[in-house]
Amino acid sequence: MSRNKRVVAAAAVAFLAIGASACGGKKDNSSGSGDNGGGGAKGGAVIVGTTDSVSSLDPAGAYDYGSWEIVDSVYQKVMHFETGAVTPTPDAAKSCTFTDPKTYTCELQPGLTFSNGDPLTAASVKFTFDRMLKIAAPNGPSSLLANLDNTTTSGTGTVVFHIKNPDSTFPSVLATDAGAIVDEKVFPADKLLDGSGIIGSGPYTLDKYTAKQQASLKANPKYKGTAKLNNSQVVLQYFSEPSALKQAVKDGTVTAAFRSLSPTDIQDLKKTSGIQVLDGTGTQKRYMVFDAKVKPSDQKAVRQAVAQVIDRAGIAKEAYDDTVAPLYSMVGNGIEGHTEAFKDKYGAPDTAKAKALLTAAGITTPVQLAYAWTPSHYGAESADEATTIKRQLEATGLFKVTLSSTEWQQYQKDEKSDTYASYMIGWFPDLPDPDNDVAPFLTKEPFLGTGYVNPQILSLLSKEQGTTDKTVRDQAFAEIQKIVAEDVPIIPLWQGKQTVVVRDGVTGADKALDPTMFRFYELGTK
């Protein structure tokens, strides 16, 4: 979920897989009856403060975290990720399976309706996906469906997805909010819906919405799905500054705060009585990227020497007050197939080893290395991160680092045009699948400029994308991570933690901190 058109287009590359998989029906204990959903909601209202912004309430135009917070709450999908799960399961569907490598067939639950009473049928699902691809909104998620050829129906309860290439990750794509089902009687077929009168079949309805101020989500009594609501209402209060959000949770204006408090604010709130700060595994990642077409990054020994001395723990502490965790490989912590390839190869930061690498390659020190970063897109702490990296490298005596900063719009163009020898980049994957952590970076046409293509990695990507066999995929990802640690086109630096701050009396915050999406329905009150 990088929420950037370049990243979006690249993420779709990861889905052009070869293979087939199947997803079984619902478990008996999650049949999706009304009692499990809005009709069975318990508890009072929870007020959640956030600095996130909303770009669109229409799923076809929404591809940022703030928008997806509402989309994920109001709309339902054929498949979804249950709390804590990394494998998608049916939601609006009762079963889904690959009937052949390029045909994915889903049987819908009977009796589904939208919150306004309109029936949700196979025609609704077909309309949704046809519409998404037709509108192809520039800031929307249609590129996630790049491998979808067309959608057909059989009767009112069967949906058939025809994909261009066999794709083992397609069920996971359907579980993203690119698959949010809309009411064909409400949403126009060829343009985005104006205003806030959105209708879905998810656990909540959007009761009221004032842009940049507040969104009120009320339990949907017609909801049939797997989510069990622990509250009757969630009010999202939007703040423009983290400092204002911090003050709101301290004085009780909001009962919970999620995305994004500064590291300093989080440390202060940890000392405040009546308030709990909970951390969970996040998916946001940060990398130092090299462009092998630009000197001195064209020399592997230079890249390896940087990898040998970079101190991830130091970056986490000095720039982020340990609100992020060191990352030692492309595949994120907590994701299937993760290894610590960089730690295995380089161990602890070691200046002597780095010097030996440069000496063996005949490289004169100090190496003149330019490092670029962008000042606002990744938050104020990115300046501290850039200066920490400069300080670490120069402290070895092996490097002389020149920093430069460029605003995001131009930065994206520059990193693709071989302007930077090395630069900062962030990543927020769309899927909890290791493929989405490696393929967009390492294909023939990656979303960012690295000047790096490795035929062995391309072969391994094809291999893992073409099977659902866990052993085969894990072996492929392990080898990919090992090659990246050897060649160092990219250095993984850190992975973010998700943090939620709640006042005493709020329950379920630990479950709400799900890596795929914050689960509002898990929050309750005593």
Image (spheres, grey):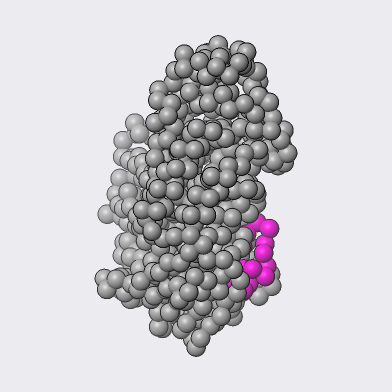
What residue appears at the point 35 percent right and 68 percent down from the top-left corner? 226
What residue appears at the point 53 percent right and 26 percent down from the top-left corner? 304
In the picture, measured across the screen, residue 418 lies left or right of residue 337, that is right
In the picture, measured across the screen, residue 45 lies left or right of residue 58, that is left
Instruction: Decide which of 91, 511 is in the foreground and name it.
Output: 91
Place of residue 85 in the rendered image (x, y in percent of width and height, measured from the top left): 36, 57
Place of residue 465 in the rendered image (x, y in percent of width and height, measured from the top left): 49, 57
Instruction: Decide which of 67, 80 is in the foreground and name it.
Output: 80
Place of residue 359 in the rendered image (x, y in percent of width and height, measured from the top left): 56, 14
In the picture, measured across the screen, residue 481 lies left or right of residue 447, that is left
Image: 176 above or below 438: below
Q: Which residues are magenta?
A: 129-142
Instruction: Decide which of 160, 155 is in the foreground and name it.
Output: 160
What residue appears at the point 63 percent right and 54 percent down from the top-left corner? 9
Quadrant, the C terminus: bottom left
Place of residue 1 in the rendered image (x, y in percent of width and height, measured from the top left): 54, 51
